[in-house]
Image (tube, grey):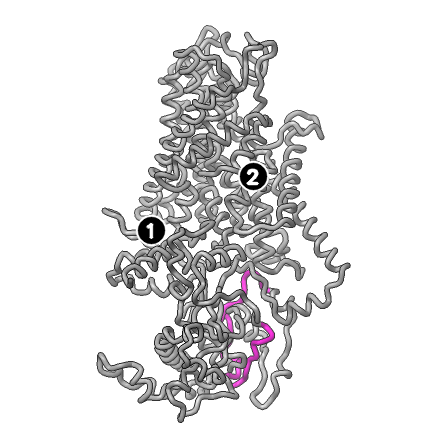
């Protein structure tokens, strides 16, 4: 019965009113915790990375010479370059408008505060700040109402997509517009969010859209170019786009490549690595070229590699006792890693509970409630920023300010422009307002490079307030990133540690290094990334000597956090019910075999099938692929010998009989609504007989009523009334897989032949015709059934995949899992030693919840 990636959940969720056991809840992806409601798993389709090598595809290969192959590869490189450049330009636009809006807001409010601090009209300044922020957040939240997928950072969705799960609307042009526009208003509106995460999502959308040369949102954008019409090509470009987004955000092309590998793609190859790196480089240098020219009027100087600039870490000139870090500092870095892991786990735990609360109490209500929640968060954040800056800040001596990149005893022009003097006079400034009344990137730069300018009390209060508000903010209905808030929160913690060591223990340390390690520790404790995050931070600092301390800190933070819960992205993926496949299964899962986890109830078609039966199958099922089989008569004697390899099919025979009989009933009911009376009369009228008495053996019912398993499915081998039970339900020889989209395409284009004709007279479709409608293939409900002759026959053999990957029923789960994940499969047939299909495995059969439930059943059986 199950042949699609999401069929199991769709089938099981029909009877929600029934009481389910914990094992059944686990299989459904639901959780029932104490005092909490059930969180149901949604139904997601799987992408198919495996090539369908059918006859139309082989015809393309036969006409592909070296010249055409070279042209195809050249187009790929051009598109990769275009994706990188487009991602860089997108980052430039976002950064320009964020800076513009933020500068306007802070200049207006800052000037008002300076005036009102003397005239006693601070309430007016607060109203101005609140009005500007709420207008920006209202616009951002409304854009998310237009396209809900644009909410959040988009990294969990892109990670799921690259893992092989099809998230509806995640890479559409409308999502891109709402995401880019919404994030610049969200950041300018003062929420504790970043624009770096949405940049990754935006790059992935560009990677998915540009090679398609068409848009679903804007239907006039459509160019009939027959290239890259498969999930395989699309996912490669999405990998490149996601890496380009990281590269543009942090100026880290190598880190972007590793991010796409570590957090996203399930499988990799050398050619893809080279293209992804080239795409990342293109994004980085495109953004660098334009930002350097616009900000410094030095075109071609390449001074600003990414949206987030950490600045240069170096000791003051002439200070021989200064070192960026020493071996003694590593002990403190390890402790900071532990603290970062603990705080990250706490952050994730609180955010998970907030997300569950929103799923139960906010999302089911009217959509404008989400806008009100965003405005509430904005209002509270604005009040906290304003009130803490006015009341909790300390006045620090401006003369004592020293930057790590300039000579001592003075404040450079850039730092002076970002210092806030609210309520501080006589050459002093407000340290809390300096952190809150600046863009987050500026605050990070100050924590990294200004020496002894923030009091421990200010840093402690800032960390607590920022921790709470950023945790509350991540998950509201606005586009929001988590990288920058986590970095800023961790940097304040690291700077606090540095101040304590300097003031209380009189240690000679470099404060900027501790701020950087604190930022890495907290960010690593939240997102649980190691390899890519290490390289991203090294490239962002442009200081290779930080490689060892950053790597150690991130490893310790990840190990500590993993002891309590998962990373923030994995948590949100789990809450959305996405069937994500991890890198590998647990060792104990090898107690199970493919026959333990497969779905034995199959819906299948014959190589030559009447239109009436195809329509019935497509209308009465939601599956996305169907095995193409013939009934095995030649091996019937061998089938009953009892050989352990050959008799694997016996244990599934009874369930197959019941399923095929029940399926025949459903098809007959569906045929009764068909516009052709000829099709309606095909069904055996005895199907509508009164059900047998409860408890009567259903096999005996079938023998007495002589149900025909498939009416006229295979013209040359139609069932006979004289067949015995064994003749009616023989083993099924497997020939290949045919997709739902392919069957619907064949029906819409009239690919069929008459019963008195040869199958050679059937019209042939080319590869471009088969993939023309990708990625939105027609639905069976778009088909005008009155135009079809139900007695016509469709030969599906030229269009099926004749050689999909298969496994034996005795294959261990770890082998099945590795094959499925590594090859990016959507369906994995289970075929026994004599070529008979006995079941099928999809993504949902390999999820952790499903395997755990099956393992429990295995122990109970033992």
Q: Secondary structure at mark 2?
A: helix
Q: Secondary structure at mark 1?
A: loop
- State yes or no: residue 718 in magenta: no
- Residue 439 image point, x, y percent: 50, 27
- Residue 797 image point, x, y percent: 57, 76
Q: Residue at x 57, y 74 (%)?
A: 746
The furthest residue to the top: 426
Above or below: residue 279 compared with residue 129: below
- Which of discs 1 and 2 lies nearer the camera? The answer is 2
Q: How many marks?
A: 2
Name the one closer to the observer, 513 or 76.
513
Q: Crowding at label 2, few (<14), some or many (≥20) Cα neighbours within 10 Å?
A: many
Q: Which mark is residue 64?
A: none
- Residue 159 image point, x, y percent: 49, 47
Q: Residue at x 46, y 14 (%)?
A: 453
Look at mark 1 in the image and give the residue it sits on. Answer: 364
Q: Residue at x 59, y 78 (%)?
A: 751
The residues colored magenta run: 773-799
* Residue 133 visible in the picture: no
Q: In the figure, residue 100 lies in which quadrant?
A: top right
* Residue 542 visible in the picture: yes
Among the two numbered marks 1 and 2 on one chain, the one whose residue lies closer to the N terminus:
2
Name the one closer to the observer, 429 or 197.
197
Could you tell me which quadrant the C terminus lies in?
bottom left
- Residue 838 image point, x, y percent: 43, 72
Above or below: residue 658 compared with residue 268: below
Could you tell me which quadrant the N terminus lies in?
bottom left
Look at mark 2 in the image and give the residue it sits on. Answer: 246
């Amino acid at each position: 019965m199950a042949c699609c990636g999401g069929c199991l959940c769709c089938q099981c969720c029909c009877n929600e009113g029934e009481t389910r056991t914990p094992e059944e809840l686990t299989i459904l992806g639901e959780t029932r915790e104490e005092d909490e409601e059930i969180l149901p798993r949604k139904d997601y389709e799987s992408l198919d990375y495996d090539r369908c090598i059918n006859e139309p595809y082989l015809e393309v290969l036969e006409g592909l010479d070296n010249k055409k192959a070279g042209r195809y590869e050249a187009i790929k490189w051009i598109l990769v370059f275009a994706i990188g450049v487009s991602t860089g330009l997108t980052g430039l636009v976002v950064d320009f408008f964020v800076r513009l809006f933020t500068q306007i807001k802070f200049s207006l409010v800052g000037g008002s505060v300076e005036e009102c601090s003397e005239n006693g009209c601070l309430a007016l300044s607060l109203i101005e700040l609140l009005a500007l922020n709420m207008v920006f957040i209202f616009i951002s939240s409304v854009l998310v109402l237009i396209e809900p997928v644009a909410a959040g950072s988009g990294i969990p969705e892109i990670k799921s997509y690259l893992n092989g799960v099809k998230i509806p609307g995640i890479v559409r042009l409308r999502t891109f517009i709402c995401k880019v526009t919404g994030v610049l208003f969200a950041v300018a509106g003062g929420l504790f969010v970043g624009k770096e995460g949405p940049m990754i999502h935006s790059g992935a959308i560009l990677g998915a859209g540009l090679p398609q040369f068409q848009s679903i949102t804007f239907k006039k954008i459509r160019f009939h170019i027959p290239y890259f019409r498969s999930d395989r090509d699309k996912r490669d470009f999405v990998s490149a786009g996601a890496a380009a987004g990281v590269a543009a955000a942090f100026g880290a092309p190598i880190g972007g490549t590793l991010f796409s590998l570590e957090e996203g793609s399930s499988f990799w190859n050398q050619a893809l690595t080279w293209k992804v790196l080239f795409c990342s480089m293109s994004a980085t240098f495109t953004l660098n070229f334009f930002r350097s020219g616009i900000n410094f009027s030095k075109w071609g100087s390449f001074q600003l590699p990414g949206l987030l600039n950490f600045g240069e870490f170096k000791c003051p000139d002439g200070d021989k006792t200064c070192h960026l870090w020493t071996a003694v500092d590593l002990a403190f870095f390890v402790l900071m890693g532990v603290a970062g892991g603990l705080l990250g786990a706490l952050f994730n735990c609180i955010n998970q509970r907030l997300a569950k609360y929103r799923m139960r109490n906010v999302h089911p209500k009217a959509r404008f409630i989400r806008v009100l929640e965003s405005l509430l968060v904005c209002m509270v954040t604005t009040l906290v920023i304003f009130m803490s800056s006015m009341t909790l800040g300390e006045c620090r001596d401006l003369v004592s300010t020293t930057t790590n990149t300039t000579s001592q005893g003075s404040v450079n022009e850039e730092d002076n422009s970002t210092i806030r003097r609210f309520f501080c006079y006589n050459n002093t400034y407000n340290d809390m307002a300096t952190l809150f009344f600046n863009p987050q990137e500026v605050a990070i730069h100050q924590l990294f490079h200004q020496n002894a300018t923030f009091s421990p009390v200010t840093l402690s209060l800032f960390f607590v307030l920022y921790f709470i508000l950023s945790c509350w903010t991540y998950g509201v209905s606005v586009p929001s990133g988590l990288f920058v808030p986590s970095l800023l929160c961790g940097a304040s913690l690291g700077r606090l540690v540095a101040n304590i060591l300097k003031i209380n223990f009189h240690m000679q340390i470099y404060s900027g290094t501790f701020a950087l390690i604190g930022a890495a520790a907290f960010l690593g404790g939240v997102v649980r990334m190691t390899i890519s995050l290490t390289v991203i931070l090294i490239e962002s600092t442009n200081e290779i000597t930080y490689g060892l301390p950053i790597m150690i800190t991130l490893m310790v933070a990840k190990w500590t956090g993993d002891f309590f819960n998962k990373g923030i992205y994995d948590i949100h993926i789990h809450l959305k019910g996405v069937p994500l496949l991890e890198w590998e299964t647990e060792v104990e899962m090898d107690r199970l075999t493919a026959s333990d986890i497969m779905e034995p109830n199959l819906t299948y078609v014959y190589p030559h099938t009447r239109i009436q039966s195809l329509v019935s199958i497509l209308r009465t099922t939601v599956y996305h692929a169907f095995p193409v089989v013939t009934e095995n008569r030649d091996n019937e004697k061998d089938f009953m010998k009892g050989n352990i390899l050959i008799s694997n099919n016996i244990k599934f025979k009874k369930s197959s009989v019941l399923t095929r009989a029940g399926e025949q009933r459903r098809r007959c009911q569906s045929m009764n609504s068909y516009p052709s009376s000829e099709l309606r009369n095909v069904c055996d009228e005895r199907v509508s007989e009164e059900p047998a008495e409860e408890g009567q053996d259903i096999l005996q019912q079938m023998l007495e009523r002589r149900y025909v398993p498939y009416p006229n499915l295979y013209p040359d081998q139609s069932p006979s009334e004289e067949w015995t039970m064994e003749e009616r339900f023989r083993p099924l020889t497997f020939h290949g897989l045919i997709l739902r989209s392919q069957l619907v395409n064949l029906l819409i284009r009239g690919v069929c032949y008459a019963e008195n004709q040869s199958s050679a007279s059937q019209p042939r479709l080319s590869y471009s015709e088969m993939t023309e409608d990708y990625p939105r293939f027609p639905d069976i409900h778009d088909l005008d059934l009155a135009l079809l002759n139900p007695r016509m026959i469709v030969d599906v053999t030229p269009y099926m995949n004749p050689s999909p990957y298969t496994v034996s029923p005795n294959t261990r789960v770890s082998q099945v899992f590795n094959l499925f994940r590594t090859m990016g499969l959507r369906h994995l047939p289970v075929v026994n030693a004599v070529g008979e299909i006995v079941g099928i495995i999809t993504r949902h059969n390999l999820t952790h919840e499903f395997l755990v439930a099956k393992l429990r059943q295995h122990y109970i059986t033992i």
